[in-house]
Amino acid sequence: MTFSLTHTVNLVDRVTIAPGVPRLDYLHGSALGDTGGRPRHEIEAQGGYFNNGLGARLSANWRSGTRVDADNGNDLHFSSLATFDLRLFANLGEKFDLVAKHPWMRGSSVRLELTNIFDAKPNVRDASGQIPNNYQPDLLDPLGRTISISFRKMFLPSPARMRQEFQQDRQRQGQ
């Protein structure tokens, strides 16, 4: 079982491009990208459980809102954003009863991932409360919630072949 919680507080984030050019302050109005400026607070939480080849991992990320100052006074306000992801997995190769019945499953695993479970999207508003065209939620996060299933198969030598190689190595070391 694992758990971690991280809280990052950004105190200063300034960049000087050249002497005589106004300094960029990402915490106080300068744009850093399509998420606005640098958020003051960022929180990451992860929890996981793994036992007998089966496991689950839940992660959550949150960032506080930011703003970008515009020269024309039409500042942009970026809301805070929280996302949650879930991953379930099974290492089928560790299920010996299953592998005994179906040897081809040795070295295989299956995974189900749900990313952005609640389909959280950034919310950007200008000074009048409108959403600017370039900041429509579906443009900022075109994927939204995604669900994926994957199957992985590693091709491993048979147990008999591994025993044979182990015995050969022991014989070579004994000579």
Image (tube, rainbow, N blue to C red):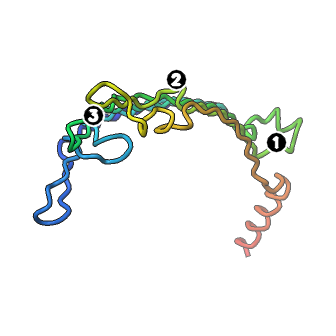
Provide the residue designation for mark 1.
105
Amino acid type at image mark 1: Met
Separation (CA) of disc 3 from disc 1: 45 Å
Mark 2 or 3, nearer chain start: 3
In the image, 167: left or right of 137? right
In front of the other: 50 or 171: 50
| Tag 3 and tag 1, C-beta contact below 8 Å | no
Which label lies toward us, 2 or 3?
A: 2
In front of the other: 173 or 108: 108
Q: Residue at x 35, y 27 (%)?
A: 130
Q: Position of residue 86 (x, y in %)?
A: 56, 29
In front of the other: 123 or 150: 123
Q: Position of residue 175 (x, y in %)?
A: 73, 76
Amino acid type at image mark 3: His
Q: Residue at x 28, y 42 (%)?
A: 38
Mark 3 or 1, nearer chain start: 3
83 vs 34: above or below: above
Label 3: state its secondary structure: strand
Separation (CA) of disc 2 from disc 1: 34 Å
Label 2: state its secondary structure: loop
Provide the residue designation for mark 2.
118
Mark drawn on residue 41: 3
Count all numbered tags in the image, as a single digit. 3
Amino acid type at image mark 2: Phe
